[in-house]
Amino acid sequence: MNPYSVTKRPLTVLAIVWVAGTAIGSRLPPGMLSWKMAVLAAALAIMMALLAIPGRRTIGLLLLLVAAAAYYQGYDAKNVSTIPHTPLVAGDEGAAETSMERQAIIYGSIAGRVNVDGDKVSFALKAHTIGFEGTDSASVNDTVQVSIRLLKQEEQARAAGWGRGDEIALPGTLKRPEPPRNFGGFDYRLYLYRKHTHWLLSVKGLDDVRTGQIETPEVSSERQADIPGGRTAFDAAIPDVTRLLRWNDDLRYRLGNVFDRLFGKEGTDSGYLKSLVLGLTDDMDPELYQQFSQLGLTHILAISGLHVAVFVAGCMWLLRLSGLTREKIIVITMVLVPFYIAVSGSSPSAVRAGIMAMIGLYMARRRIWKDALNVIGLAAVVMLLWEPYYLYDVSFQLSFLVTLGLIVGVPRFSSLLPIRSPSANSLLSVTIVAQLISFPITVYYFNGVSLLSAFANLLLVPFISLVVLPIGTFALIAGLVSVHAGAPIGWIVSKINAATFWLIDFAATHDPLRLVWPKPSLLWVGAYYLLLWGVYAGTVKWKEENKPPAACAAVAVMIVFLWYGYDPHRFDRTGKVQFIDVGQGDAILVRTPQGRHMLIDGGGTLMFRKPGEEWKERKDPYEVGKKLLVPLLKQRGVHRIDLLVVSHQDQDHMGGLQAVVEQIPVRKVLMNGTWKGNESSRNLFETAMTKGADVITAPEGGRLALDRFTELFALNVGGERSLRLAKEQNSESVVLLMRMYDSRFLFTGDMRADNEESLLAHLQGAGKAGLGAGDVGVKPPVDVLKVAHHGSKTSTTDEWLTYWKPKASVISVGLKNVYGHPNPGVLERLERSGTDIRRTDRDGEIVFTVTDKGLNIDKKL
């Protein structure tokens, strides 16, 4: 009999069908199915199970598939905002939305943990009343994501005293979350949507924020009745639940403070142990977390099956010492598991592990049928019934896939290993199977994999889980008694951590096997698992029947498959010029027809800090290179940057490049031949040279071939002059003209009008440096002009546009930037020239696809 048949493992089959149905429901057009259809399909499926008719199992499974899809759609249909899109003025209900941002005051209660980080406070708000200027207040039932920028240091202490359930009134700017502005960019709007959040509220300072007993404006009965999903009698039970959750938040905070007292709040030990033991990741050192991520070890920091298993084993061992009976030990442990899951943060992986642990303990208590695959199937269905959006949570996906892979794969894989030692065989099997199962999900979401990951997991996961985690927990328990009681254990943990951190730092810093992997398609992910099963089946046939051809063929196909996945555009002969939206800055990625990559600038986060404002610094501040640019480059399969152009050394052009040179190999860096003399420039060029990149300039008129179809002409690079100091960098910008096939692109950095005038005089002069009207490479017109200095009034003169006659112009500029870019006068001159104007603030990322036939233009927004 098939071990995965409906009769032998019904819950496993149910889980597979339910997951597939949920995925189908999420892909169908909204409103196609409903709750009623879900109930009807489920009832018919149960009827099929009871009737002895031909094909009842197949029909029943299809009905369950429909039920799951309809359940998702019915659930999703309820995920709507009750906050009106337009101000509530009598008679305007049918009016169009007048503005994407509105000033509003929202009354509600804090619905989650309050995070105070430097000058930023963030939390989720459960809103029950909203008012707009000049309008009546309305009753709503929405979750709003709040972000407050603190203006005074003393406001930090006030915000830190807030907690879940506190009533609060917040005046601020209400707006919808933005969609991604780059192709393949992180979709924050969708992320919040799956957390049932549809609005953002931005607040400046706490002067007008009220907390405590707040008098809520009266809402007319009309305004209450027309709000779907409004406050009902059921909401009366919510305060009790909120108090329980608030108690849990306070408990987690106090437990975290124990680690702060034992190890010091500013050190790495406290944040690391908070994450490892309590699931509190906010205080973990960002650089240390990045190293864990690079080596594929972040799963050890997420509360999961391993943590729950250690907790259950520890509880049962301690209870056994007290002389209790087996049945009582199991019951007490079952009661403690939900408590541990709540204290550890209730992540999807923790909930999955907790459900499985409680089911397993119950079955052990009753001495009844048990099967790991059925248990995990039941846990999956329960979680998806509670929250269908879990299906798209990476923690949920990895947790279930790896657990399923370990249950199914470890016994089979261990039987193939020629290792007699049971412990060594088991350890190696678990490590390799976990790596093989998690690989496609890892590259799908994180676009990178380290070949050292298997060795790091083999050595560090058992050590951290069986040594550091228990001792860290004991230190926490002892620290609850007193700091003096926990100090000796804490000293031991700190020494162990020091060795662990040194090893992780060494491995991450000297990792020659780190691979950048482009984001694969879901079809590729599915094909990977099928091929993996094929390799296993072929290996079994080789071992049992001594017939190696099937195994060799499967391995060969898998190698070709991985080779294709690593570089799917290997045979694509189209070029791409991608103007990435990095806000107020430049970042241009060029992929040549033969797969070379050139990156011109990398944006940068501008920081304006005055002396005495150190309190505003955040633990992990937003940095455009680390948070936006590097993930996009990895997702697009940029394994190496053949030429990195630093047009000049202003922060909005080079700030994001530090993260690039740290995480992606760079062959050559082309710079302008000057030195700004600041720390950012020094760090960038030193890091690039340390990692083996050549830092070069090029003579004016020089040529640089990127591949057979792509050539660069240096119009202004700094030449062969000796390096000189230049504090003002805009006038020193690298200016490059690129020819790809027969299309020409002119990249201008932040050059000024006087630079344009000098360059035009140079180009129009006959026989100078090999340039002039007779040189085909730099002969106007150009197809695309990168408008200098984000459309500032200091550049882009009529003479410049008349000479180059650009067919299209791109302005890299931040949305609602404080500089007023692009300048209206520049826009007017561009319009007079007849060029097609493209702007990243309005269009998002702008992509030019280049072929030997010409150009195609695409935009994200």
Image: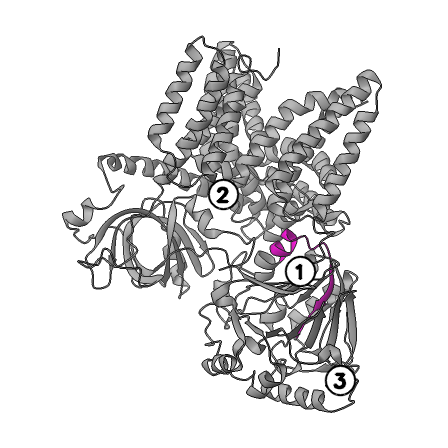
- Residue to which mark 3 is pinned: 774
Q: Distance between the Cα atoms at labels 2 and 3?
A: 72 Å
> Which of the two residues, 108 or 139, is positioned nearer the viewer here?
139
Q: In this rendering, is residue 49 above or below 846?
A: above
319 over 94 or under it: above or below: above
Badge 2 marks a residue whose secondary structure is helix
User: Is residue 202 rendered to the left or right of residue 208?
Assistant: right
For image coordinates 53% across by 34% down, the residue present is 349
Residue 167 in view:
no
- Mark 2 or 3, closer to the camera: 3
Tell me, yes or no, whether the highlighted magenta stretch contains residue 642: yes
Q: Residue at x 44, y 59 (%)?
A: 120
Asked whether residue 762 is drawn in magenta, I would say no
> Of helix, strand and loop, which one carries label 3?
loop
Q: Nearer the viewer, residue 549 or 463?
A: 549
Q: Amino acid at mark 3?
A: Gly
Q: Find residue 660 and name its label.
A: 1
Q: Magenta span covers which residues?
A: 630-647
| Drawn side of residue 707 relative to residue 825, left or right | right
Which residue was labeled with disc 2? Answer: 256
The quadrant in which residue 440 appears is top right
Mark found first going from the N terminus, 2 or 1: 2
Q: Do the numbered discs 3 and 1 sit on residues whose CB atoms are within 8 Å?
A: no
